[in-house]
Amino acid sequence: MKSVIVVGAGIWGSSLALRLADSGWRVTLVEQHTPGHVRQASAGETRLMRCAHGTDDWYARMAWKARDGWRRLGERAGEDLFHEAGLVWFAGRHDGWESDSARVLQKLDIPCEVLDPTDGGRFFPEFRGDDLAFLLWEPHAGVLRARRATQITARLARAAGVELVRARATPADGAAVEVDGEIRRADRVVWACGAWLPGLFDVPISVTKQDTLHFAVPPAWVTPGTPAWCDYDSSAYGHGDVDGVGMKATSDQEGRPYEPENGERAVDADSLERSREYLSRRFPSLAGAPVLFSQVCQYALTPDAEWIIAETAPGVWLLGGDSGHGFKHAPALAEYVAGILDGAHEPEARFGLHERVPARGLRTSGMTG
Ligand SMILES: Cc1cc2nc3c(=O)[nH]c(=O)nc-3n(C[C@H](O)[C@H](O)[C@H](O)COP(=O)(O)OP(=O)(O)OC[C@H]3O[C@@H](n4cnc5c(N)ncnc54)[C@H](O)[C@@H]3O)c2cc1C
């Protein structure tokens, strides 16, 4: 039986552990806290599921495939992990990121629709779109119950035979890790350590503090049909009130450098100001809505927002650099990485440890600085 040690029980590590256990590997999953603990990126209350990725079609296909994975996982868990409310992109230009996305989605037969800004009234009780060129509607996008999905994935992994070890692992020689003073070996070791990866290996990842805000909104806004939304040029995104945690309205702009283990998890005043400024521009009556829920999380950003899937020594793999857009892909990514570990295919060259050219088209954020 092939064996693997996966370090990190965020959604990437847990999904991979589950996938490998399902396909007959002996799997050890090492996590320093507990799956779904609030320091990990995967413990965000919600994460958006979208297929649009600008000109890129690899991630678009991956996201579309992952959507099936989430539905299957939900069925297996007996719980709805994906709320398919759809997602509206607010396009400020006719020739920008959204029109590139629309072309790719149409080419891949992933359902989408180009709408007039006045159609915004179909989706939201109040909408100001007079600065917009068009709307791009992805009917099969939506909202993932992220923290819950992470906990459930880890639970299913354990039920599938994965040994979950609570400890902080450090790299040892070869395909091995040191855990509580003991060296554990396996055929493969995968370090899926999110924002902790740059503390363990020399990787092109910078970690930034990201604040998310959810607002208490009037009853007319609290309908299951309220979709998710993104404004790429303004680096703003959010979704309707899912599960009573309020309407998310937050920024995808990079925050300041951050330390994931001991960093203070209090939301900054300027994050609130930025969210309110966007609400007042797009949904004016919500400008004064009170904050209902907030979270501090961190991005593990590569310069080009491409992930890292790289073998650094025989059998030793790094899986990280999700760059703030990795949650949605997890079930499909797990299948892809399992194929690599099985020797069925090589990772794409784009995921290597080469020098990266800065780019941001894979994120939902077109705004710099
Ligand atoms: C504010 C915010 C918004 C986001 N929005 C979206 C979105 O809308 N859509 C989307 O698809 N993605 C989104 N993302 C990105 C998504 O959350 C991440 O891509 C995903 O959660 C990454 O999962 P991970 O498993 O790689 O990392 P993590 O969830 O951080 O897990 C890493 C785990 O490794 C453990 N670990 C680290 N070092 C060790 C060690 N030495 N020993 C043992 N355990 C260790 C940590 O404790 C942690 O549990 C967002 C991220 C943030 C921060």
Image (cartoon, helix red, strand yellow):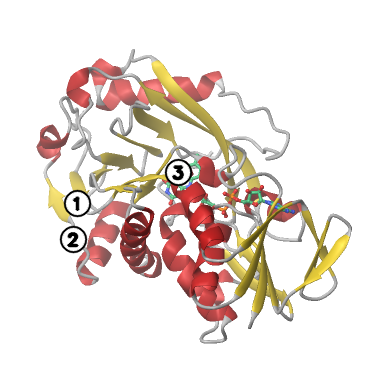
Q: Is mark 3 on a helix, strand or loop?
A: helix
Task: Tell me the amino acid under the disc marked 1.
Answer: Pro
Frontmost of labels 3 and 1 is 3
Residue 112: quadrant of the picture = bottom left
Image coordinates for residue 61, horizontal then vertical, percent? 34, 68
Q: Which of 38 and 301 is in front in this view?
A: 38
Say which residue appears at 11% left-offset and 43% top-offset: 116
Image coordinates for residue 15, horizontal then vertical, percent? 51, 61
Q: Nearer the viewer, residue 354 or 35?
A: 35
Q: Residues within 10 Å of mark 2 (few under 14, many from 20)?
A: some
Image coordinates for residue 355, horizontal then vertical, percent? 65, 67
Between the residue at mark 3 and the residue at mark 2, the CA separation in whole angstroms equals: 27 Å
What residue would you read off at disc 3? 148
Say if 152 sits above or below 183 in the image: above
Task: Tell me the amino acid under the disc marked 3.
Answer: Arg
What residue would you read off at disc 2? 111
Task: Tell me the amino acid under the disc marked 2.
Answer: Pro
